[in-house]
Image (spheres, grey):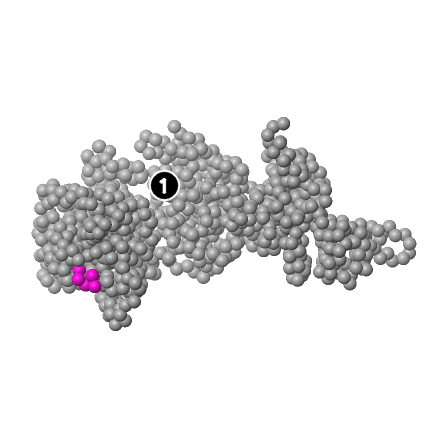
Amino acid sequence: MANYFNTLPLREQLAQLAQCRFMHTVEFADGVEALKGKKMVVIGCGAQGLNQGLNLRDSGLDVSYALRPEAIEQKRQSWKNASENGFVVGTYEELIPTADVVLNLTPDKQHTSVVNAVMPLMKEGACLSYSHGFNIVEEGMKIRDDLTVIMVAPKCPGSEVRAEYVRGFGVPTLIAVHEDNDPKGEGLALAKAYAVGTGGHKAGVLMSSFIAEVKSDLMGEQTILCGMLQTGSLLCFDKMIEEGIDPGYASRLIQYGWETVTEALKYGGVTNMLDRLSNPAKIKAFDLSEELKVIMRPLYNKHQDDIMSGHFSKTMMEDWANDDANLHKWRAETAETNFEKTPAGDVEISEQEFFDNGILMVAMVKAGVELAFETMTAAGIIAESAYYESLHETPLIANTIARKKLYEMNATISDTAEYGCYLYNHACVPLLADFMKGIKSDVIGKGLDVDDNGVDNARLIEVNTALRSHPVEAVGSVLRGYMADMKKIV
Amino acid sequence: MDSLTRLDDIHLDHIRLTKATVSFDDRFTLSEIDWTITPEQHWVITGPNGAGKSALAAALAGIGDIQSGSIQGVPNNVEIVSFEVQAELIAQELKKDDADIMDVISLGTPVSEMIFDHCQDTELAQSLVEKFGLSNLLDRAFRKLSTGETRKVMLIRALANKPDLLILDEPFDGLDVDTLAMLQAHLASLIDTVPMVMVLNRFDEMPDFITHVAYLDKERGDKERGNKERGDKGRLKLTVDRQDDAAFNELYQLLHLKTTDLSVPEADPTNKLPALDPSQPLVKLTQATIQYGDTVIVDKLDWTIERGQHWQLSGPNGSGKTCVLSLITGDHPQCYTNDIFVFGFQRGNGESIWQIKQFIGYVSTNLQWEYRVSTSCKNVIISGFYDSIGMYTKSTDSQKKIADQWLALLGMQDRADQPFNKLSYGDQRLLLIARAMVKHPPLLILDEPCLGLDDINRQLVLALIEKICQGSETTVLYVNHHAEDQISGIEHYLALKKNN
C-alpha cells in the first residue's frame, strides 16, 4: 500500500488540506433519520467503541458488536463490555454481512488487519466508518468501490463522549467523507446522522476531509498538545528542583498548572491566558515565548514536514512491525522521570498562583500554540483546522495530566500520538538546554520578585497588540463565538 | 434518686416540658412536646397556620388540659398577651353589659381601671400609658376601644405587672410603626430580667434579642395507627439556635414554603408534552431481570404503574431499587434486553432515551452528585425542560418566567443568578425537585429525596413534595426507607428483597 496523500497532485493535496468548516445547527435537522432502522455493527469494544455504541443505541439506533472469536471465547474485557451492556455480540462472520454500517473503532495499528478481515464480508453498498483517517491517508488502504467511507471523530476520550451525552450534551466532533468512496452520495448524510446519534451535533461539528484531519491531527498531538506539555513538564520540574523549590510543590504546580492556565486559554485564547498575569509577568512571559519560538521553530517545521512527506508514518509503522519496541522503551523512560516519580505535595495553590508562579509554563503554551498554528497554516492546513488541533485541544490534554500526570496523558491519547509525542520530546529537551540555563525560579516556582507592578507603557502596548493580532486569536474568537451558542451556558 | 432526676432538681429555674400532651377542648392537641427554656433564653414560636403556636404559648400560661407528660418550672407570675385572652376580656366586658338590668346605658370598665387595678408598678404603667399614647383614652370604656387600642391596654397591663415569664402571642400585629419601635425597644430593655416567649408569623418582625426559635407543624391525619384523639395535632418539629445562621435561614425558608399562598407553577403552555394514550399504563415491566455475570440483582419482576397510582418503592440497600428505576428512566443498559413498556414505547424499537425522559421528572442523590456543572440556580430549574444536566441551548421567555415562579415558591428569588454549586446541599435538593417538576411530567420519580439531609432540610423537602402532590396530575413514584418520611396519598407499595 502506498501513502495515499503522496499519490495526489499538489492542487488536490492543497484542496483537501483546506477543508474545514463549522457546521450550522440547521444542517442536523434530519436527526438520526439516515441511520434509522439500519444495522450498525461496531468493531472494537474499548472506550470509544463501547461509549459511542451506548450513545447511538440511546438515540434509537440498532447497534451490535463484532469481536474476534478469541475475544468471545475467552470472555475478554471487550466481550464483557458489550454483553453486560445488553448488546448483541457476534463474530465478524456472523454480524458483518448483515451490517449497513460498520464502525471501525479499533486502534490505528489494527486498522489494516481489521479492514482486510471485514471488507470481504461487507454487503454491497454498505458503509465503513473510521474515527481517524490514518489508515486511509497514511497507509493508503484501498476500500472496495461499492462501499461508502466516512469518518466521525468525537474530539474527546470515550468516557467523555458518554458522560456528555448522558448530561444531554455531546462533545465536539469532526466528520468527513472519503471522496474516492462515496458511490451513492450518501456519505455526508450518514456521517451527520452518526454525529447526531453520539450527541456531537449539540457541541459543534466540523466538516473536514480525511487528509486535513490526519495531517493536522498528527501535527497538533505531536507538538503543542502532548509533546510540548511533556517537555515542559520535565524541564520545568527539574529546573525547580535545581532552584531549591520543594519537590511536592513543584510537582503540584506542574501537574495542575497546565490545566489551570489552559482553562484561561479555552475561554479567551492566548490573549486571555496572558492577561491573567500581572503586567510585568505578562511582558516576561511574552519575551520568553518569543525566544522559545525562535529556538523551536525548526523543530515544528521538521515535524510538519515529516508528517506531510509520510516520513513520520513510515518510521512509526516500522516500529509497529517491530512490536512497538521504541514505543514501549520510551514509555518506560517517561515513567522513570523525576516529575513522574514525585507525587504532588499536599499544599494549597490558588488558581491565580498557578499563573503567577508558572510564567514559563504560560510562555511555553503560548509559544507551542502559536508555532503549531503558524506551521500548520504555512503547510496549507486551513486556519480552522489548525485552531482546533492546537489551541482548542490543549486544555483537553492538560486535563489528563491533572488526573494522573504524563502517564495518564499518554494512556489516554492514541499510540500514534504517544509515539509522536516522544519523538518531539527527545528533540526538544536538548534543543532547550541552553535556554533553560538562563531560567531562574522567578519565572517558574516563585514568581517575579518585583517591588511594584510598574511597566513601560509603550512596551505594554506593543506586547498587548502583538498578542491580540496573532492569527490564531482572530480565527479563535470567531469559532469560540459559534461554539458559545451551543456551549454550556456558564 | 438517680442522677438524671438530681440534675433536673438543680435547674429549678428551667421551664421544662416533658412529653407534654395538652388538649384544648376537643379541637386541638399539642402532642408529646419536649422543650426546655432556660432563664437567659428568649424564644419565638413559629410554624404554619394551625400548627399550634398559640396553643403552645397558652400551655405555658397554664391553659389547656395536660393529658400526659408534664410541664414544670413555670413561674407563678406569668403574663400572656394574645388574641384569645383579649377576646375573653372583651367577652367578659360585654357580659357585664348584658347583666345590667337597669335601664341605663352601661359604660363598662374604664381603661384606667383595667390598667391600674391590675398592675404592680403604677409608675411604670403611667409611663407606658404615655408611651403608647393612651393618656386621653383612660376614661373611655375598655369595650369601646378599637382592637389595636385594647391590644395596647393588654400589653401595658402585662408589662407593668413585672412578670417572671412574658408570653406575647403576635404582639406586633396591628401596631403602627412608631408604637412597634417603642415596644421593641422596651422589650429589649427587659431581656436581662424576664425570659420571653413570642409567637410570630413573620420572621422579619423577630427582635434581635431572640435567641431561639421553635418550629411547630401540624401532624398529618394518621388513621392507620388507630388514633383516637380528635381534632388536629401539633408537634414541636425543630428548635433552632439563632446563632446557627444556616439553620436559621433554612427555617425561614421552611416557614415560607409552609405559609406561602403561591402554588406550584403551571407547565409551559408554549411547549406541551405529547399526549399519552389514557388507556395504557404509564409503565409496565414484564419479568424484568438485571444481572451482572452470574449475579442477579433483579429477578423476574412484574410491575405496572397506572396513571394516578402513586407508588412507594422500598427495600434494603442492594435490593436493586435504583436499578429498577433506571430501567424505567432508560439509564440502565439492560433496559434493551428486558420487556419494558413506558409511555407508549415498547423499549428497543428505535425510540431515543430523550423521548422517554421527556415524560419523567427525576430526583436522586446521584443526580445531585452528577449535577456538577457551574450554572445558575435559574438555569438548573430550566434544564428540567430539556432533561439535561446544565443548559446547552437558549431558554425561552416562557421557561424563564416559570423558573422565576418556582424560585418565588421556594423563597429563593434573590438567588436566581447565583451559581448552583455554591448553594447548601439542602437548597440544591430543593432546586432539583423543582427542576424535576417544572414540566409537570406524567411520572415523578423521587429516589430517596431526603437522603443525606438534616432534620430541617428534610422538613423543607417534604413540604415541597407535599405542595407538588396537591392537585397535580403527576403520578408519584417515591423511593425511601425512612418510615417517618411519608408522603400523603401513596397507597401502593412495592418492597424489593435482596437477592443473594
Residue ID for mark 1: B332
Which residue sits at x=41%, y=59%?
B395
Q: Position of residue B66 (x, y in %)?
A: 69, 37
Tell me the quarter of the picture where residue A8 sits.
Answer: bottom left
Q: Position of residue B78 (x, y in %)?
A: 71, 45
The front one of B296 and A297 is A297
User: Which quadrant is home to the C terminus of chain A?
Assistant: bottom left
Residue B91 drawn in magenta: no
The front one of A84 and A255 is A255
Q: Position of residue B324 (x, y in %)?
A: 41, 38
Q: Mark 1: which amino acid?
A: His
Q: Main secondary structure of the magenta part?
A: helix
Tell me the quarter of the picture where residue B484 sits.
Answer: top right
In the image, farthest residue toward the bottom:
A458
Judged from the image, the secondary structure of the residue bearing numbered disc 1 is loop
Which residue sits at x=59%, y=54%?
B208
Q: Position of residue A63 (x, y in %)?
A: 28, 44
Q: How many numbered discs sit on the rendered protein? A: 1
Look at the image and give the residue range highlighted in magenta. A287-292
* Left or right: A414 in relation to B165: left
Which residue sits at x=25%, y=50%?
A245
Of all chains, the one bearing label 1 is B
B215 above or below A307? above
Which residue sits at x=62%, y=48%?
B42
State whether residue A408 appears in this view: no
The front one of B246 and A288 is A288
* Left or right: B173 in relation to A38: right
